[in-house]
Image (cartoon, grey):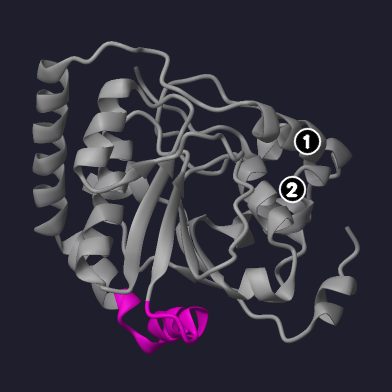
Amino acid sequence: MAETVPNPMEDWTVVLPRRNKTRKTIPTLKSCQEQQQATQWFPTDVENDPKRESDLMQKMLTYMKKLQDSQFYQTFLSQIETPEILENFIKILGTESSMQMVIYGIGSIESYEPPRLQLSLAILLKRKFSWIDTIEVFDPIISLAESRVLEALGCSVLSVNEFGRRRALSPTLFFMPHCEAELYDNLLQANWGVDTLNRMALFGNSFSVYQHYGSIISNSTITSSRQHILHVSSFVEEVKIATISDDYFRAFNGSSWHFFRLDSESQLQLVKL
């Protein structure tokens, strides 16, 4: 099925979708908290399928090898190792020796290529940099076979849908390419404080693009669900990834690194949400 680029003036989906599924509605803070307290997540399928898991594992290993050997990956690593990005990670680590990686919204690695490439990149980063400790993954559409393959690849699959509201109580890299804007906003809202924002890095859709469209869209319903994204411009450093080749465009187009630099709570108090 051919993919189309949604009109950013309508819903701010400014990157190509990476899986063919209905767009999820992210709950408000109250309903999200109620669901987190009451509901655990389990794959909808319950039967093991060793052949399916074996085929998917082989597919993932093939994609990881392809990505590792690509010019895209080498350029991506080179950019991380520049002072512009590496010093940000050092500041986030502080006195800690490692940070966790949290992946939200990865999609179906069995059904679609972009999620396979995105997961491959996350795993290769963990293997490359000793300061990335663990990888936790969540998407409500993950199947049992996908969950078992993720675990075999060294990831942990979350059993609770956090709706993106993980607080960065320790250094954390949030890996969220091509997620919905509401999920990014939930993450920012949950971490709306100096200590937590300064302890996190985010790899995902460009906030500056969201902010650009926010400046020309007057729809209050849309802007209210993205208000934290719109108000971080004064204390977020965004670095767009250096290169996009045709082979990896669908998986990583429009992606940036985001680092937060706040000196005091007064910077947040000046923000009118």
Q: Is residue 195 magenta?
A: no
**On the picture, is 156 further left or further right than 194?**
left
**Disc 2 to disc 1, how far (Cα)?**
12 Å
- Residue placed at 77% from the left, 31% from the top? 31
Residue position marked by numbered label 2 in the rendering: 226
The residue mark sitting in front, 2 or 1, is 1
Residue 71, quarter of picture: bottom left
**On the picture, is 246 further left or further right than 26?**
left
Seen in the picture, residue 87 relative to 31 is either above or below; the reply is: below
What segment is highlighted magenta in the picture?
79-97
Q: Is residue 81 magenta?
A: yes
Q: Are marks 2 and 1 in contact (CB under 8 Å)?
A: no
Picture coordinates of residue 228, whole percent (x, y): 75, 56
Question: Magenta span: helix, strand or loop, mainly?
Answer: helix
Can the viewer see residue 86? yes
Which residue type carries mark 2? Arg
Element class at badge 1: loop
Q: Quadrant of the C terminus?
A: bottom right
Among numbered discs 2 and 1, the one appearing first in the sequence = 1
- Residue placed at 41% from the left, 43% from the top? 137
Label count reads: 2
Which residue type carries mark 1? Thr
Picture coordinates of residue 122, whole percent (x, y): 30, 54
Can the viewer see residue 177? no
Seen in the picture, residue 263 relative to 75 is either above or below; the reply is: below
Residue position marked by numbered label 1 in the rendering: 28
Instruction: Please name whichever residue, 139 or 232, is drawn nearer the observer in this view of the structure.
Output: 139
Picture coordinates of residue 18, whole percent (x, y): 40, 34
Element class at badge 2: loop
